[in-house]
Image: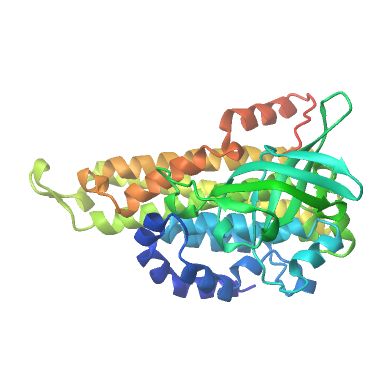
Amino acid sequence: MTNKVLEAVQDLLPGIASRADRCEAERRVPSESIAELSGAGVFRMLQPKRWGGLEADPVEFYEVVRTIASACGSTGWVCSVVGVHPWQLALFPDAAQQDVWGADASTLVSSSYAPTGRLTPVDGGYRATGRWSFSSGCDHCEWVLLGALVMGPEGKPIDFLTICVPRSDYRIDDVWDMVGLCGTGSNDIVIDDAFVPVHRTLSFNDVSALRCPGQVENTAPLYKLPFGTVFSYTIATPVIGMATGAYDSHLEQMRERVRISYGGQKVAGDAFAHVRVARAASDIDASWLQLERNLDEEMRFATAGEPIPMELRARARRDQVTATERCVGAIALLFKSSGGHALKNGNTIERAWRDANAGSVHAANDTERWLAMYGTLAFGLPIEDAMV
């Protein structure tokens, strides 16, 4: 099947790349980039068809994300994170979907999942108060998904909820000033005291078990995939895109470069440069191909209406963290091989190096934790992490 969104995005890449400096300087993705990408259908790829979405194969969505991130890491990151939220909103009760998309099905949603706020049970729902950080792309969104713990009578958490809150109930605190992913506008969300009706909550117990209320109306196999796969690939894929962009830029810059320190030798004729390029290319390819394989296999189980094996879900997490690790390493190799010119601010490789390292510190990219989880299962021991 032709990925028409990808075709449309290809035409937008020169403009996105030309705005990369501005994206960093303004600390948010330029509004015209968001408008162009919205027009291309990027943010509706994982949205249910009954809401005018495309219900696209997830591999197609991540292909688009990877391509955008190759031109601008921050823009690719925001497209990935904001673009995955229609998938999660489709898991909420239908009344929540009506609240968000009923008046305008193109409404965008941001998120901050770390449960740093407080929920107090009240009749019909909860009162929410607190501050949530790292809400990428929030300036362009009218709703937000937030993580929150439900506490039991003994003061211990008994459930982890995602709550859905409208812009009228929160404010954005402009705090984003970082060394990498500078243009993602990942600012803080602050709620002083807002009512959240119960239909705008989603239990992570249900999400982990792949049994969510929204699946009653949204029956496509897409909505039967594990959150642990879909969300973590949302974080890893932009890093693969950054590595792809760094690789292409490195080849373009080095083809005609002459190293005076090495007797005027052309880099293109340097066997050591050939080896570095080969290693980087292999790591980037391996990263993408493993993610693609895992998504294809999970979709086959979901389409057949069969349970997705825990071994496959764990493998998906294993390959996600190693994909990020490989691509960060590939960029570092290209950065070093590019010489002193790569140090200049605004150089594509320099920016990819900063952005990829910034993306690698996301909790979803905790390499040792998820590799240990995979090894635990491989030895036949039980795993209980809900993010699988």
Q: Position of residue 247 (x, y in %)?
A: 37, 52
Q: Which residue is rendered at x = 65% and y = 26% of the image?
A: 372
Residue lying at 50% horizontally and 58% vertically, measured from the top left: 76
Along the line of sight, the residue nearer the viewer: 328 or 155: 155
Relative to residue 168, is residue 380 drawn left or right? right
Q: Nearer the viewer, residue 321 or 293?
A: 321
Total numbered labels placed on residues in the image: 0
- Between 263 and 63, the residue placed more toward the observer is 63
Furthest residue toward front: 192
Q: Residue at x 58, y 33 (%)?
A: 366
Look at the image and tell me in which quarter the N terminus lies: bottom right
Colouring rule applied to residues: rainbow
Residue 120, placed above or below residue 94: above
Please indicate, yes or no, whether residue 361 appears anywhere in the rendered image: yes
Is residue 308 visible from the viewing direction of this image?
A: no
Q: Which residue is nearer to you in this view: 111 or 351?
A: 111
Q: Position of residue 384 (x, y in %)?
A: 79, 30
Q: Is residue 357 left or right of residue 162?
A: left
Which percent across, then down, holds residue 254? Answer: 24, 54
- Establish if 14 lies above or below 230: below
Residue positioned 68% across, 60% down in the render = 168
The image position of residue 293, as x and y in percent, is: 64, 51
Looking at the picture, does residue 176 appear above or below residue 304? Answer: above
